[in-house]
Amino acid sequence: MAADSQWLSPSQSRDALCIAFTWRKHVDEVAALLPDIEAVLAPFGQRPHWGKMSSLDGAAIEGLYPRLGEFRDLVQRHDPVGKFRGPFLERIAGL
């Protein structure tokens, strides 16, 4: 994917290679494999896709997305009571 300037894009500020897998609803098996896959990809600064499964926590995500703090500020400004937030954003973005 070509580099772009989108705050939460996996290719924000850099070209990126996208690797996609089809799991066919094997959620538990995929969840068990994710830490190993992510560990192998970690030296390359992988950024998980926001719509896909990931075992990374908020601290790991924070280091991978340089503008996550700005996104967090934007969300807090426009959604101060958390109407459009859920467990995923709470876990990943600390919202």
Image (tube, rainbow, N blue to C red):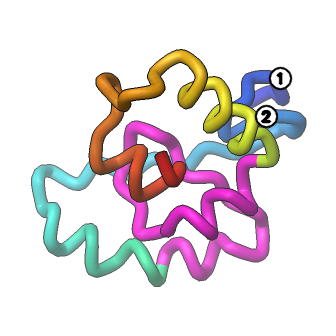
Task: Give yes or no for contact between labels 1 and 2 (Cβ–Cβ under 8 Å).
Answer: yes
Q: Is residue 63 left or right of residue 81?
A: right
Image position, residue 81 (x, y; %): 37, 28
Q: Nearer the viewer, residue 40 or 80?
A: 80
- The quadrant of the rendering that contains the N terminus is top right
Mark 1 neighbour class, 10 Å CA radius: few under 14, some 14 to 19, many 20 or more: few
At label 2, which amino acid type do we have? Gln
Q: Nearer the viewer, residue 41 or 73?
A: 73
At label 1, which amino acid type do we have? Ser
Image position, residue 20 (x, y; %): 45, 47
- Bounds of the magenta segment: 37-65
Determine the secondary structure under disc 1: loop
Q: According to the image, label 2 marks what residue? A: 12
Q: Residue at x 67, y 40 (%)?
A: 10
Image position, residue 22 (x, y; %): 29, 48
Residue at the extreme right: 13
Is 64 covered by the magenta stretch?
yes
Q: Is residue 36 left or right of residue 46?
A: left
Q: Residue at x 64, y 71 (%)?
A: 41
Determine the secondary structure under disc 2: loop
Q: Residue at x 73, y 30 (%)?
A: 7
Residue 5: mark in rendering? 1
